[in-house]
Image (spheres, rainbow, N blue to C red):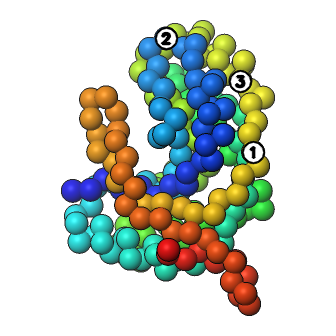
């Protein structure tokens, strides 16, 4: 069964900038630059027939593009033992929030329940098991003012993910590009 998510890729210069700060905490599994992305919706495992329905439904979503910028570094959960280190994403003009809402609406039409957690645009940089708290605190302080961008979001992607002992392997399943329509404004279309 495919394990799916919908995501936005980052421009290569931002991946390089983020990977440049990803060090200095023992026992942390940093994500490789190729896997850095912004998840719009995590779907999880689905049957093959549902995979095809998702692929078709998202292709006609008609989403507007977004403008974003990276701002700040933090962790989840905010209190207690951190499990994830992330880079924050500012949604200039709320286009990203609208894109997320439309993807969730499309998935609900297929009977897929949205995540219960509120949408918090971020880029996961690392997953933590038992890192020294002092090292995490020092990393967060050292990188608190991190910024990158702005960057335009002109496409979103459907990915499958296969879990291995070395980490997840992501496979691009479909791309949905945004384009300017002559009389109806800016819309996303399947290539």
- Residue under the point 45% across and 73% down: 58
Question: Pointer 1 and pointer 2: residues touching (CB < 8 Å)?
Answer: no
Q: Residue at x 74, y 31 (%)?
A: 146
Work out whether 61 lies above or below 77. below
Q: Which residue is mark 1?
A: 149
Image quadrant in which the N terminus is located: bottom left
Q: Earlier in the sequence, mark 1 or mark 2?
A: 2
Image position of 75 (left or right of 67)? left
- Which numbered disc, 3 or 2, marks the residue that appears first in the sequence? 2
> Disc 2 on helix, strand or loop?
loop
Asked where in the image residue 25 lies, by quadrant, the reply is: top right
Q: Nearer the viewer, residue 43 or 111?
A: 43
* Mark toward the viewer: 1 or 2: 1
The secondary element bearing badge 3 is classed as loop
Question: As displayed, is residue 9 above or below residue 97?
Answer: above
Q: Which residue is mark 2?
A: 26
Between the residue at mark 3 and the residue at mark 1, the CA separation in whole angstroms equals 16 Å
Residue sitting farthest toward the bottom? 183
Label located before the other in sequence (3 or 1): 3
Look at the numbered discs 3 and 1 and tell me whether their residues touch, using CB distance below 8 Å: no
Q: Nearer the viewer, residue 85 or 16?
A: 16
Q: Residues within 10 Å of mark 2 (few under 14, many from 20)?
A: few
Residue underneath mark 3: 143
Q: Is residue 106 left or right of residue 186?
A: left
Q: Position of residue 9 (x, y in %)?
A: 55, 51
Cα separation, mark 1 vs mark 2, equals 29 Å
| Residue 115, percent from left and from top | 46, 56
User: Within the image, what quadrant is residue 135 found in?
Assistant: top right
> Mark 1 falls on what kind of element?
strand
The reply to whether residue 118 is in sight is no
Taking the spot 43% from the left edge, 70% from the top edge, the residue there is 107
């Amino acid at each position: 069964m495919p394990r799916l998510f919908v995501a936005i890729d980052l421009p290569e210069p931002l991946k390089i900038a983020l990977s440049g700060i990803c060090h200095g905490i023992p026992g942390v599994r940093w994500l490789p630059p190729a896997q850095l992305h912004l998840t719009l919706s995590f779907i999880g495992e689905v049957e093959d027939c549902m995979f095809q329905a998702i692929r078709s439904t998202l292709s006609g979503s008609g989403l507007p593009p977004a403008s974003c910028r990276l701002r700040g570094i933090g962790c989840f959960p905010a209190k207690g033992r951190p499990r994830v280190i992330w880079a924050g994403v500012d949604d200039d003009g709320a286009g990203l929030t609208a894109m997320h809402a439309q993807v969730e609406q499309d998935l609900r039409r297929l009977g897929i329940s949205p995540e219960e957690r509120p949408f918090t645009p971020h880029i996961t940089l690392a997953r933590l098991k038992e890192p020294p708290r002092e090292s995490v605190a020092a990393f967060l302080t050292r990188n608190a003012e991190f910024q990158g961008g702005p960057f335009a979001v002109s496409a979103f992607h459907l990915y499958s993910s296969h879990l291995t002992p070395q980490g997840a392997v992501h496979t691009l399943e479909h791309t949905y590009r945004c384009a300017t329509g002559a009389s109806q404004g800016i819309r996303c279309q399947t290539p």
